[in-house]
Image (cartoon, rainbow, N blue to C red):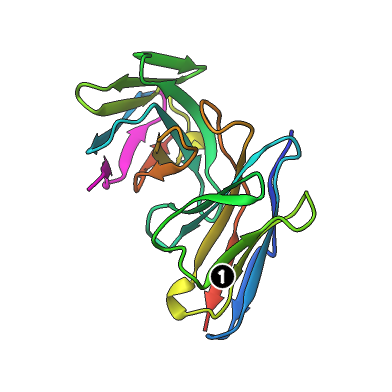
Amino acid sequence: EPEVTQTPSHQVTQMGQEVILRCVPISNHLYFYWYRQILGQKVEFLVSFYNNEISEKSEIFDDQFSVERPDGSNFTLKIRSTKLEDSAMYFCASRRDRVNTEAFFGQGTRLTVV
Amino acid sequence: SQKIEQNSEALNIQEGKTATLTCNYTNYSPAYLQWYRQDPGRGPVFLLLIRENEKEKRKERLKVTFDTTLKQSLFHITASQPADSATYLCALDDSWGKLQFGAGTQVVVTP
């Protein structure tokens, strides 16, 4: 069964450092997403990406965040200067079509900012 | 502002019984509504999708209803099993591809 893979599974970083979270979406999917989940809270949308550009982003996704699809298979989320409040589980997801289809989520990267 | 509400209290249920979970939303007109299962420390896993013009959808022991007038979806797990213990998330799909999740309801099925 196809799956979305994310690396690393856990990342600890110092405040102010840059981190890159990596994802390999399902190969024939066209729509890619990042979500985050702070411990004990709900899953929150960060950004959607289609045709090599951002199609929508939330208020959380400020100038410190960026996404990229560098090589046609990987999909990355970069946080330029991490803050303590960026500590969360980050999930990558992909969908075959924009509507009427399920989203496939990766297992997540747990980011801990110290 | 848009709001999605799910029962915050855990639902404790005996094996074999039917679990019923509620998702209510306001200030929103989703084209689709989805239900996901989430286990601790894991990503959400898709269960069912229902369109705004569908009243009910079934998949094995799962059933979901969608009432756009009441702005409510009900999710049923029949003949529940301990393996069904997890958190169940309601997600509104705005047809632009973004999912907006409720906080989820934890279900605990005891033998």
Chain letter of mark 1 equals A
Q: Is residue B8 left or right of residue B58?
A: left
The crowd level at tag 1 (other Cα within 10 Å; few <14, some 14-19, many 20+) is many
Give the number of callouts.
1
The foreground one among B83 and A28 is: A28
The front one of A70 and A92 is A70
Left-right relation of A21 to A34: right
| Residue in the image at 51% along x and 18% along y | B59
The N terminus of chain A lies in which quarter of the figure?
top right
Q: In the image, residue B76 lies at what x, y percent?
A: 37, 24
Task: Inspect the magenta stretch and tell me whether residue B12 lies in it.
Answer: yes
Using the image, determine if residue A46 lies above or below residue A15. Answer: above
Callout 1: SS: strand
Q: Position of residue B60 (x, y in %)?
A: 52, 17
In the rendered view, tell whether residue A96 sits above or below residue A65.
above
Q: Amino acid at mark 1?
A: Leu
Query: At which x and y percent is residue B35?
Result: 44, 33
Q: Residue A64: give x, y in percent of width and height.
A: 51, 73
Residue in the image at 70% along x and 41% along y: A3
Report the front residue among B111 and A28. Answer: A28
Residue A50 in view, yes or no: yes
Confirm whether the magenta stretch covers residue A97: no
Looking at the image, residue A20 lies above or below residue B57? below
What segment is highlighted magenta in the picture?
Answer: B1-16
Q: Residue at x 73, y 36 (%)?
A: A2
Left or right of B109? Residue A55 is right
Quarter of the figure with residue B26: top left
Reading the image, the residue beneath label 1 is A111
Residue B79 visible within the image: no
Q: Quadrant of residue A102?
A: top right
Q: In terms of image quadrants, where is residue A76?
A: bottom right
- Compared to residue A99, the image places residue A6 above or below, namely below
